[in-house]
Image: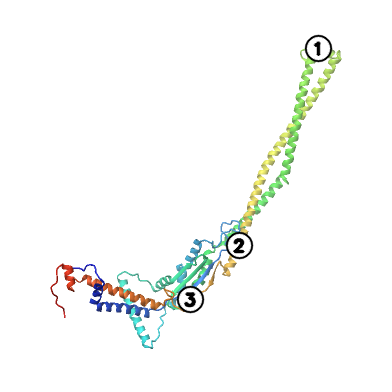
Amino acid sequence: MPLEKIPSLRDFFTIVFKYKWSVLFLFLFTVSSVGVLTYVWPFSYEASAKVLVKFEREKAPLSGTSGSSNTVMTMRGTEEEILSEIEILNNRFLVEKVVTHFWDDLTREVKTEPVTFFQKAKALLKNAASTVIDLIMEIGYKLDLIQKLAPFESQVARMHKGLTIEVVKDSNVIEVKYRSWHPELSAAVVNKLTELYLDHHIDVHKIPHARDFFDEQKDIFLQGLRVSEDRLQEFKKQWDISSINIQRKLTLENIAELNQESNSILGNLMELESTVVSMRDTLSNRTNYIRAEDIALAAVNSDIVTRGLEEKTVIDESRIKGLKARYEILNDQLEYSNNRKRDLDSKELDLNRMERELELQEANYKRYLSRLEDTRIDEALDMAHIANVSVIEPATVPFSPVRRISFLPRRIMHLSIGIILGLMMALSYAFLAEYLDHTFNSSAQVERMLKVQCLASIRKE
């Protein structure tokens, strides 16, 4: 029957002393195993470099829009763009190139002949640990618990695992770290990775065939500009248009004068016709003739007043005929001027359309010519490896191994962890064994578990 909750500290130590040899063995085994692994396992060295991302260099956009101070840049000062640069740094393409470059260093096994007893013991323990690890890995491969990788893939995965790329807080600086067992290799890998990144950064942000594209577009718009200029000159020459605005202004002034004169003549005509009708009525009343044409010449000549009215009527009728002739001439001139105005309006629309087309072709030509020059500048900068990212702090060979806690040496920390782990495992084993033990070890246990009084006990010798 399992034990109940331990009632006192004495029972705790009773259990510990009951399994003292097992507890001691397990504790020593755990501490010694951790100590051996700590002593055999090589130190890790970490090298780091810092890359500054700048935001002043511009790139020519493919759309050909006019450049300004706010033109799209290679890098924008945003967190997303910084993270994009981190992905470029951490991509598999660069890591594979680094692994290929340092393949001999990564796969070379440095063998030194042990001389002292401690060196021989360390080499022996290291070989034993490697054999055990290889055996465990082989069992994992056969049971499909671990995926077996090719040597190159294994080195790429290992390098990815050792790489740490992050943004320095509140800055546009990227820090690249690599951890390895060899300090020189750690620094060399970081420096090679940043070197490859600078070249790859230019290739990634470079617009493919941008110069050919802008050069082709510039020639197209230049040809269109020349066609528009020839068309406009031919149009002006055909219609003799030196200044269509001046001609239109003169035509409008002429139309206004003709309208004014025509209205004046029309008013005079109406006045004269009314006067003539009145005088004819007067003549008819004085001669008792109903119609003016029936008045006899003798009747007219016999009266001085009547003769005067007749002469005045004849003169006014002549003036009416003259005004009507002038009015018809003015109407013809006015119709011509209106037609001229409509032609000028139509030609002005055509001229404005051609001028707008010419301005558009000229603006597009200048825009693509400017973008072509920007692209040439970018290509020159790329050829000189001038980019908006630069290494401000290259990696140097680390002299001290990595410490989890800055003020505590790594081996002391591991041994401390081993001691704590050994105590936990040893005590856990003791209490677990006691929990699974169904025998009575004292008279107190008998009385407590069976609820009966123990009269006597025989000590086991």
Q: Earlier in the sequence, mark 2 or mark 3?
A: 3
Q: Alpha carbon of mark 2 to alpha carbon of mark 3: how far?
A: 37 Å
- The image shows residue 231 at horizontal and vertical percentages of 67, 49
- Residue 439 in view of the camera: no
Q: Which secondary structure, mark 1?
A: helix
Quadrant of the rendering where the C terminus is positioned: bottom left
Task: Give the residue number, with chain letter if any, for mark 1.
Answer: 287
Task: Give the residue number, with chain letter if any, for mark 2.
Answer: 374
Q: Is residue 153 left or right of residue 77?
A: left
- The image shows residue 103 at horizontal and vertical percentages of 44, 76
The quarter of the picture where residue 453 lies is bottom left
Depicted 195 relative to depicted 73: above or below: below
Label 3 packing within 10 angstroms: few (<14), some (14-19), many (20+): many
Depicted 296 relative to depicted 148: above or below: above
- The image shows residue 36 at horizontal and vertical percentages of 34, 80
Please give the label number shown on residue 122. none
Label 2 packing within 10 angstroms: few (<14), some (14-19), many (20+): some
Front residue of 248/158: it is 158
Q: Which secondary structure, mark 3?
A: helix
Instruction: Give the residue type at disc 1.
Output: Thr
Q: Earlier in the sequence, mark 1 or mark 2?
A: 1
Front residue of 283/18: it is 18
Q: Residue at x 78, y 17 (%)?
A: 280
Task: Give the residue number, with chain letter if any, for mark 3.
Answer: 187
Front residue of 116/437: it is 437
Front residue of 415/229: it is 415
Instruction: Give the residue type at disc 2.
Output: Asp
Q: Residue furthest left?
A: 455
| Number of the front mark, 1 or 3 | 3
Q: Is residue 253 left or right of residue 176?
A: right
